[in-house]
Amino acid sequence: MKRLDAAAADFEAVFAGLLNSADQAAPSISRDVAAIIAQVRSQGDAALFALTAQFDRTAIDAANIRVSDAEIEAAQAEIGADLHAALDLAASRIEAFAQAQMPNGIEYTDTLGVRLGMRWTPLDAVGIYVPGGKATYPSSVLMNALPAKVAGVGRIAMCVPMPGGVINPLVLAAARRAGVTEIYRIGGAQAVAALAYGTASIASVDRIVGPGNAYVAEAKRQVFGPVGIDSIAGPSNVLIIADAANDPAYIALDLLAQAEHDELAQSILITNDADFADLVARAVDAALVDLPRAAIAGASWRDHGAIIVVQNWTQAASLADRIAPEHLQLMLANHEPVFAAIRHAGAIFLGGNCPEAIGDYIAGPNHVLPTSRAARYASGLSVHDFLKRTTYVALSDQALGAIGPAAVVLAQAEGLDAHARSVACRLKSPLPG
């Protein structure tokens, strides 16, 4: 864990290294991923079967690559009533927040008589990737599928790796609750390739969403174009801005909640109190003693974690914008001034009662968020990722006469004569030439 003092002479150099540390640690795997994609494109299902046996130690074929309705029903029966209730509460809240995001179309006629508009239509088919390696994530199913369902997507296909043939039944139950129409027991870059290009068993989709490991992220990068993607997900991260009024043990657990995702995850604390920083550092060490995923969380905290001591909250907000965190917790007695100053964050959690973990499951807003400082220019997943905007224009004779001549002039200036003539031939008094 790095300890930084914003007043130190070498702070800028150390802080720059902190911003780049997690990304520098990510392996370069583009060649391996390209080979997997090429194999799936050339061999189709046969490649999926072979790669699943190789990487997931699972034998699949055309008869069982897709999870059956009977398996989904059995999974639903396997989980307890408390989990069903929690799943339904989470789904209802995510669905309601997605519904509130649905945009309205635009249509108006301007003063020249030009009818202008924009309408929204859903994608036809979406592919969802759900991680299945170091942890299983039914919450990810809900977060990715429900906005697509609310947007009106007709076909939602899900790929989830099942190492050793085992899957968390809650993942299947979440898929059923979220309106997923197809579930396939494949993962990795090969699943992304199948969703992008199609095979005999899996029809291609229009957009692929959902988090995954470095191979999945690289595969999404390589198939972008033939299909859309949500983002290129890097290591997860959290930034916590906290004052000394907080319980150090609570803040330590908030930091470790992010660190336990992955060894490359990054957890950062900014505080204005050096003594509080010491207490949190000790609380992290204490919490790691009995944490089931201590090996992963400990490696993340050791290699990428940091505590930064600042002189004031204005400085904290400035550093936060430079970090552009995926998740930002404002654990301050008066968080509103800092909240108002922040411009770059994927999701913000306000006050001591709102740790980031509540957003991972039950709050309502999406937990698929921009990583690797992408919050400077990108947003979290929403219904807008499953909708397209289409503009339209209609011209009366009067409207064409009002704006058409200017179009002709501009087209001629660009040397595009067919453009100019296309408009001029429709004018009552075509321009000379």
Image (cartoon, helix red, strand yellow):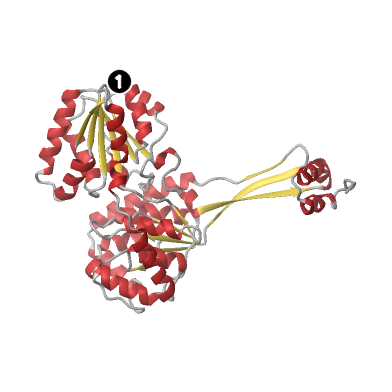
Percent position of residue 417, x then y: 79, 51
The quadrant in which residue 74 appears is bottom left
Percent position of residue 39, x then y: 39, 71
Q: Is 196 above or below relative to 17?
A: below
In the rendered image, which residue does mark 1 sit on?
312
Taking the image as drawn, is residue 4 in sight? yes
Name the residue located 26 percent from the left edge and 68 percent from the top edge.
Answer: 56
**Disc 1 residue crowd, few under 14, some 14–19, many 20+, Cα 10 Å:** few
The quadrant in which residue 334 appears is top left
**110 relative position to 12: left or right:** right
Q: Is 15 above or below relative to 118?
A: above
**229 relative position to 30: left or right:** right
Q: Is 210 above or below relative to 303?
A: below
In front: 197, or 207? 197
Q: Amino acid at mark 1?
A: Asn
In front: 99, or 10? 10
- The N terminus, quarter of image: top left
Taking the image as drawn, is residue 176 in sight? no
**203 relative position to 93: left or right:** right
